[in-house]
Image: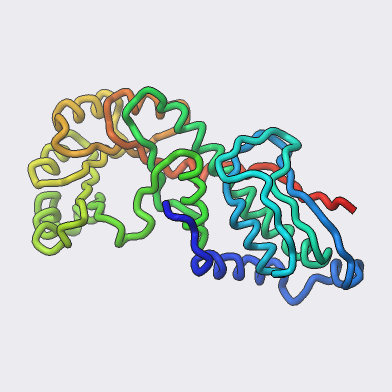
Amino acid sequence: MAPIHAIQLTPVITRALEEDWGSGDWTTDICVPAQTQASAKIIAKESTLVAGVEVARATFLLVDPTLTVDLKVGNGAALNSGDVILEVSGNARSILKGERVALNFLGRMCGIATLTRTFVNELSGTKAQLLDTRKTTPGLRLLEKSATVVGGARNHRMCLTDGVIVKENHIRAAGGISKAVARLLESLPPTLKIEVETSNLDEVQEALDAGADLIMLDNMSLAQMALAVRTVRGRALLEASGNVRQDTVRKIAETGVDFISTGAIIHSARWSDLSLLFNI
């Protein structure tokens, strides 16, 4: 995944700051004199994999471009409790007004990266690669999918124009797998691959015969997935999906599939416990 550009990032941060500030920060503006200078640090309060340092930095600088933000680690760093992620210095009011939003982004992204890495570690020694999904928090897809990449996963579709997946309801509406794929082959740009969701071995064979490039094995048993691998024999790529958990992902990979997709690495990720502390 390419680095997040400021053009993409600024609107996301702006919306978050608008939501957090409301019509003003009574506490900060009354308690803290306007010219007070301060320095602070964000620390990990538990073991975590770092993701989102550039987002936290951009948050503080959008609040106040005169702040100085010193990143102590990069994305992908493995931290222990007490380790410093970044230091920020300058106007105390500005630091306080950016604190919660910066921590929200950073905690969310670190949590996703950390959980993703645990899944990826389970795949060691297999050929399977972990994919994320479009089950993301509305408005935060770019950040959440960036965090899965830091954790070692690969991005699936970022949006609907990134690829073609013929899912169960498409198949029903189109009148079957063969008809759906035939229509796509007639009109689809030749640079896009066609993936078809299947729920049984008969559908796997139909998708293969129709010319699918990728075949999704949706909620199939381990025995069915292993048989699908032997049936396809490399003529299409196979993606396992459904019921993918940390305690099942290894066994799924051992069936011989090429990819394993799961939304759990995003929607089930616990936020990492982080804190901002002033050094006054």
Q: Position of residue 174 (x, y in %)?
A: 16, 58
The correct choice, above or below, for 234 with respect to 76 in the image is above
Residue name at image x 22 percent, y 41 percent: 215
Decide which of 52, 205 is in the foreground and name it: 52
Residue at 73% from the left image edge and 42% from the top image edge: 84
Say how many tags the image has.
Answer: 0
Residue occupying the point 66% across, 68% down = 62
x then y, percent, for residue 49: 59, 38
Residue for point 77% across, 74% down:
24
As drawn, the residue found furthest toward the bottom would be 23
Q: Give left or right: position of 3 versus 185.
A: right
Q: Quadrant of residue 29?
A: bottom right
Q: Residue 228, position in %: x, y? A: 19, 30
Colour basis: rainbow
Depth order, front residue of 170/238: 238
Classify residue 54 as left or right of residue 64: left
Image height of 121 relative to 135, above or below: above
User: On the rendered structure, is 176 left or right of 279?
Assistant: left
Residue 135 percent across, percent down from the top left:
43, 51
- Depth check: give the residue in front, 258 or 168: 258
Q: Quadrant of residue 253?
A: top left
